[in-house]
Amino acid sequence: MSADDSHTGADFEAIYRAHRDWAVGLAYRFCGDRDEALDVMQEAFAYLWKRLPLRVKATTLLYPVVKHLALDRRRRRRAQALPEEIEGARGIPDDMRDLLAPLSEDHREVVLLRFAQGLDLAEIAEVLRVPLGTVKSRLHYALAELRKKLGGD
């Protein structure tokens, strides 16, 4: 192992410790099973390891990987899933899930990324691989629909 390899290993360990709970929580929101969420987290970090050194924030690279892996696991056991569950909204309070239910999947995902995950608009555009203007538009229309539902404006 070279000096560069050990430095990369130390960097990876720091990234893992800083983001493992976030990755498990995100995976749980999409697949709804704690054990599967842990498996998804492990697979996502194995994917991340192959891409070291990172040139972007770890969460920017991890989000689409965790989402894809978790949704894939959920699709494999869809027969067990409840039809009223909102894809991508597991692990959030029922009242918030009910509030977000009428939003399209694209709008719901942008709202969750912005407010539940705390990503800024540019980060959301990067993880969803859409233009920044698309993120702004989706967030604008989602918030307008939520305001209307809550009786404001």
Image (cartoon, rainbow, N blue to C red):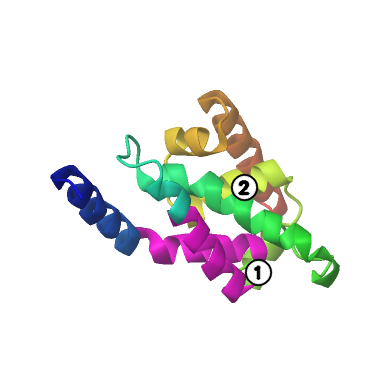
Residue at (58, 38) in percent of width and height:
139
Which sits in the foreground, 14 or 87? 14
In the image, residue 28 lies at what x, y percent?
58, 66
Q: Quadrant of the C terminus?
A: top right
Q: Of the residues shown, which amino acid type is indicated by label 2? A: Glu
In the picture of the structure, the residue carrying the numbered disc 2 is: 109
- In the rendered image of this protein, does residue 151 appear above or below residue 31? above
Horizontal side, residue 84 vs residue 147: left or right: right
Q: How many marks?
A: 2
Which sits in the foreground, 28 or 106? 28
Quarter of the image for residue 54 reads top left
Q: Of the residues shown, which amino acid type is indicated by label 1? A: Gly
Residue 23 part of the magenta-drawn span: yes
- Of labels 1 and 2, earlier in sequence is 1
Quick one: label 1, few (<14), some, or many (20+) residues within 10 Å? many
Residue at (48, 62) in percent of width and height:
42
